[in-house]
Amino acid sequence: MKEITIQELLTVTGGKLLSGDPSVRFDCFSTDSREIPENALFVPIAGENIDGHRFIGKALENGAKAVISAQEAPLLAWKEAHPEAKQALILVDDTLSAVQKLGAYARSLLSIRAVGVTGSVGKTTTREMIAAALSAEKKVYRTGKNYNNKLGVPITLSELSDEDDLAVLELGLNVPGELGLISSLCDLSCAVITNIGVAHMEYYGNQDRLTEEKMTVTRGFYDSRKEEKTLFLCGDDPMLVKYQGLTGYPVVFYGTGENARYRGVNIRPENGCYAFDFVKDGKTLFPVHLSVPGAHNVLNALAAFAVADFFGVDLQKAAESLSGYGGFQGRLQRIEQDGVLYIDDSYNASPDSMKAGLKVLSEMAVQEGSRKIAVLGDMLELGPDSARFHYEVGSYACKTKPDLLFLTGKEAKMMEKACIDSGYASKCRYFETSEELRDALSKEIRPGDLVYFKASHGMHFSGLLQELLKK
């Protein structure tokens, strides 16, 4: 982030300076009082369980150059206890709103161009594949960690610099209005919508309302030159195709059908992953060889080619760079230990992504006498149709025929019912707690097995897998 003065902060946020020099500058901010970089502004966030305002004093002790706060008392307490302290103390109405304004302001100071990536499934993988393709010829910044929400995106924007040519920003959606808000901070040159699934259906009720919400990503196109903005949509998704002429911006499709400008054909398995022939504007250009499993990653790769072409990256070089992409933590990540291959797909889950993962598992080869074991947990935030979605996934799991199916979670009981109804009960085991599941897996898994993990983030399967790996 370029240096910003306290006076600029006051102007952007409408804050009130209680103490300190308005000419003082800072070049980053932190929401963690334990980790205060040099020249940092501390931003306390009031969370569901912990209110960061409790740690204002600790942040100042740890070197924060300035603090914004929605509560006056801790600022006055610090000022009274440290009358000689020179840190800037700023009172604002709401710290989250202030940090969003600050992130947008930091973004406005930079000439870097950006692409936003959103969708129900595959955002992070698509983000990483786009970054890999662009990296063939550009210096690229991509969203870090899980910084894709109303707090994470401003943090990401504060980390951009003019040293980068392009930024790839993942934009999430948890509740109505969030995507439009965070995209409006970003000044996007283009955006990708990967698909419309059924994630977060408890907030939207149907896919049409969800699609309308996804289209608010275009609020990031606030430059007046509409013709220079482009929305890339997956042409294989009928919900996105329906909205082609309703966005107000140029739309380009990628996918496997004839409606796609960037198209994959002759899609074929290859060494546990996938290859395809890349077609642009009806002309076959070259074969592409991916290093990640799953046929769905062909679509993610096509999105990467579309964005690379938009930013002027040589597509052959983009393909070479993309072929080296080997996956991202918690998204079909391969971990080999003691003769067992674990597939960690535990970062999050929806019906579409869980079916895609089970398909990947069914397509992977194991040695004779070895087994494929699927470990599945609840898919959260599916609303009133959650039981139906879990039953459908359970039925699909039976069709993919893993040798063993381990289940846990309140909602996963419907997966178990589907297995019973499908005559697959002998292969299915349900556990009331993750501890029982862990202990059973520890006893069951043997060298040669292929073990796949998938559940919503709130099921903490990543920790479950780490416990297994330590044993």
Image (cartoon, rainbow, N blue to C red):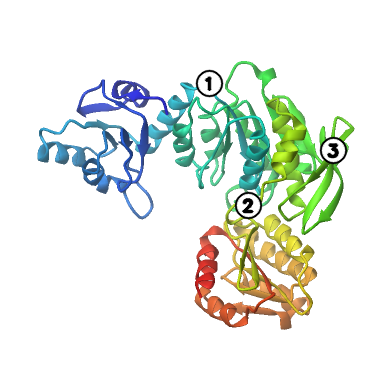
User: Which amino acid does the dot numbered 1 rest on?
Assistant: Ser
| Image side of residue 166 versus residue 136, left or right | left
Labels 3 and 1 touching (C-beta < 8 A)? no
Residue drawn at point x = 73 percent, y = 64 percent: 361
Labels 2 and 1 touching (C-beta < 8 A)? no
Q: Residues within 10 Å of mark 2 (few under 14, many from 20)?
A: many
At numbered mark 2, what does the secondary structure look like: helix, strand or loop? loop
Labels 2 and 3 touching (C-beta < 8 A)? no
Q: How many angstroms separate mark 3 from mark 1 (CA)?
A: 33 Å
Residue drawn at point x = 55 percent, y = 42 percent: 176
User: Which amino acid does the dot numbered 3 rest on?
Assistant: Phe
Q: Residues within 10 Å of mark 3 (few under 14, many from 20)?
A: some
At numbered mark 3, what does the secondary structure look like: helix, strand or loop? strand
Looking at this view, is 411 or 76 the one in front? 76
Residue 217: mark in rendering: none
User: Which amino acid does the dot numbered 2 rest on?
Assistant: Ala
Residue 286: mark in rendering: 3
Residue highlighted by disc 1: 111
Residue drawn at point x = 70 percent, y = 31 percent: 308
Q: How many angstroms separate mark 2 from mark 3 (CA)?
A: 35 Å
Residue 454 location, quadrant: bottom right
Residue highlighted by disc 2: 199
| Image side of residue 140 versus residue 391, left or right | left
| Image side of residue 376 versus residue 237, left or right | left
* Horizontal and vertical percent position of residue 183: 55, 33
Q: Residues within 10 Å of mark 1 (few under 14, many from 20)?
A: few
| Image side of residue 465 versus residue 212, left or right | left
Please tell me whether residue 174 is drawn above or below residue 282 in the rendered image: below
* Horizontal and vertical percent position of residue 193: 68, 39
* Horizontal and vertical percent position of residue 178: 53, 39
Q: Is residue 90 visible?
A: yes
